Amino acid sequence: MSQIDTNIPRSAYIHIPFCRSRCYYCDFPISVLGKKTNIHASSSIQEYTDTLCQEILVTPAYKQPLNTVFFGGGTPSLLPVKQLERILSTLDKHLGISSNAEISMEIDPGTFTLEQLQGYQKAGVNRVSLGVQAFQEELLQSCGRSHTVQDIYASVSLIQKINLENYSLDLISGLPKQTLEDCEYSLKQATALSPKHLSCYDLVLEPVTAFGKQYQPGKYPLPNDETAAEMYRLTQQILTEAGYDHYEISNYAKPGYQCLHNRVYWKNKPYYGFGMGAASYTNLQRFTRPGTRQDYYTWVKELAESGGVIDCSKLSKTDILLETLMLGLRLAEGVNLQQIRALFNDKTVQTIWTSLQPYFSNNLVGVTDIFGNSPDANKIVNFEKINRIYLSDPEGFLFSNTILASLFEKFS
């Protein structure tokens, strides 16, 4: 049965907003603690955990346990173990957590100890994502990261010491003054550590960030568009040759180690969101919580008084369609046209097929038929036998914004 029919969330995102400092590219809803704050005695973290657990408890619960839980931020590794245990315990008691659930946590180099990591693991965390970003000291400093290259290796050593096999490294390309050689070096250093997963993001300039106020896209010291594209191609080449599957535009995994939680987003399935600035998708409604702590605290108080009811409009069928296309085409497997036809109608599939015609000839979009073959889309007469459409790797992914704009224009 489709997600639109059931709409029962089986995943939860938990936002932990605390950071030592704000990175120059970051526009996430965070609370800066400063470098001298004792996190274990922080009243701010205690108060936030109290409010977060209250939000969980007043949220309507279904009789379906969670398959994935993801702690994002911010810097979740600033969260004391006892607070993490309390949050997971609250989730389990109120919503339920499957015995084999993927429980992920973002962690930053230099922000945790061996004892802390062991505590997270004992509490149930079985996947971590380490925010490396680059393997050059000057690049880390230039983007406001608080860790060093030495911290990266020390943190990986701690992860390996507790035998936490399922870990990911995050890298960023397109940083100021970053060269192709820098990009290649970081990728090779990362693969030498043999993580099961790598997330490789291209720098996005957001207007409210330090970088957004200081730099212009495509202009020095940022790499130009051509160099940024070469970085993307180089990333795809190095990581696939190293045995990683390029399963999503920015994500690579060894077989069996895709991030199950993030796949919930890309498959446009429902999920809970908890915490300051967290987004949720339940009951065909998307909702984002207030992005400051005090506003969030006030909102949770009002939520409790209303019996856990969030009042916002449901998405239209067109909204659901466009989100399904936008998110699904990020995946290497693409979008299932048979499911689109079942959820919408033949006319919808016809419109999608027509809008993609210009991209078949230059091999930016590929297709798979119901028999599992990959025929030449230009020679297909009966598109009703097509099962999936997908963007080619890497060129189709590079032009994803252009292709999606064509689709959106047809349905707007």
Image (cartoon, helix red, strand yellow):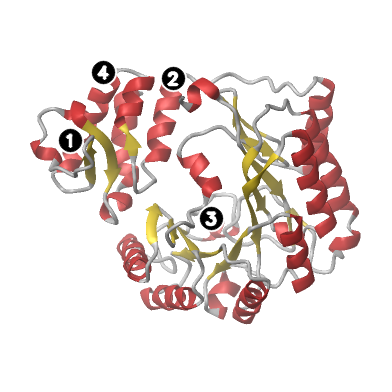
Asked if the residues shown at circle 1 and circle 2 are in contact, with their CB atoms under 8 angstroms apart, the answer is no
Q: Which amino acid does the dot numbered 1 rest on?
A: Gln
Q: CA distance from mark 3 to mark 1?
A: 36 Å
Residue 67 location, x and y as percent?
Answer: 61, 42
Q: Quick one: quadrant of the C terminus? A: top left
Residue at x 34%, y 30% (from the top left corner): 408
Closer to the chain start, of discs 1 and 2, is 2
Tell me: residue 248, above or below residue 368. Answer: below
Q: Which amino acid does the dot numbered 3 rest on?
A: Gly
The mark found on residue 347 in the picture is 4
In the displayed orientation, state which residue is furthest to the front: 99
Q: Which amino acid does the dot numbered 4 rest on?
A: Lys
Q: CA distance from mark 3 to mark 4?
A: 42 Å
Q: Secondary structure at mark 1?
A: helix
* Near-viewer residue (349 or 11): 11
Residue that numbered label 3 is attached to:
212
Residue at x 68%, y 55% (from the top left corner): 74
Q: CA distance from mark 4 to mark 2?
A: 14 Å
**In terms of image quadrants, where is residue 34?**
bottom right
Residue that numbered label 2 is attached to:
317
Q: Which amino acid does the dot numbered 2 rest on?
A: Lys
Q: CA distance from mark 2 to mark 3?
A: 35 Å
